[in-house]
Amino acid sequence: MNGTFSYELRLNRAGVLSARVYTPARGNGELSVQLNPRWATHNLYFKAGAYVEDTTGPATEGGKVTFSRLITMHQPNNR
């Protein structure tokens, strides 16, 4: 909360999806998973934002996200 971080998402040709997180205060981390080969025939996309899944509390409750920079890159035939 109230902190900055950066992250990077990559999907390689072998179907490995990796998420890397960089934080000045708490260090860095990475998680990689092998996607099921059945996903290879589907187009995947990424959406940046804040998606609060909380269904309890008052309707006025919410969150705020500020993006200072957003870079996207697409490499055709990256499968």
Image (cartoon, rainbow, N blue to C red):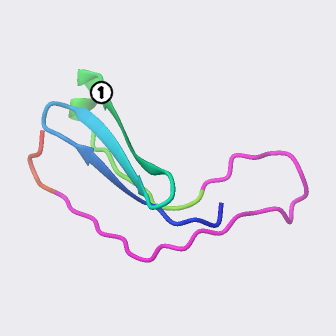
In this view, 62 is above or below 21: below
* Quarter occupied by residue 72: bottom left
Number of numbered discs overlaid on the protein picture? 1
Q: Residue furthest right?
A: 58
Query: Looking at the image, which residue is at 11% across and 53% down?
Result: 76
Q: Quadrant of the C terminus?
A: top left
Query: Local crowd at mark 1 within 10 Å, few (<14), some, or many (≥20)?
Result: few
Query: Looking at the image, which residue is at 86% across and 46% down?
Result: 56
Q: Is residue 56 left or right of residue 11?
A: right
Q: Amino acid at mark 1?
A: Leu
In this view, 1 is above or below 77: below
Q: Residue furthest left?
A: 77
Question: Which stretch is magenta?
Answer: 51-74
* Quarter occupied by residue 23: bottom left
Residue picked out by circle 1: 35
- In the structure shown, which secondary structural element does the residue marked by tag 1 occupy? loop
Residue 1 image offset from top left, x and y in percent: 65, 60
Query: Looking at the image, which residue is at 80% across and 45% down?
Result: 55
Residue 32 image offset from top left, x and y in percent: 32, 33
Magenta span: chief secondary structure: loop
Query: Looking at the image, which residue is at 87% across and 60% down?
Result: 59
Q: Is residue 55 magenta?
A: yes
Q: Is residue 71 magenta?
A: yes
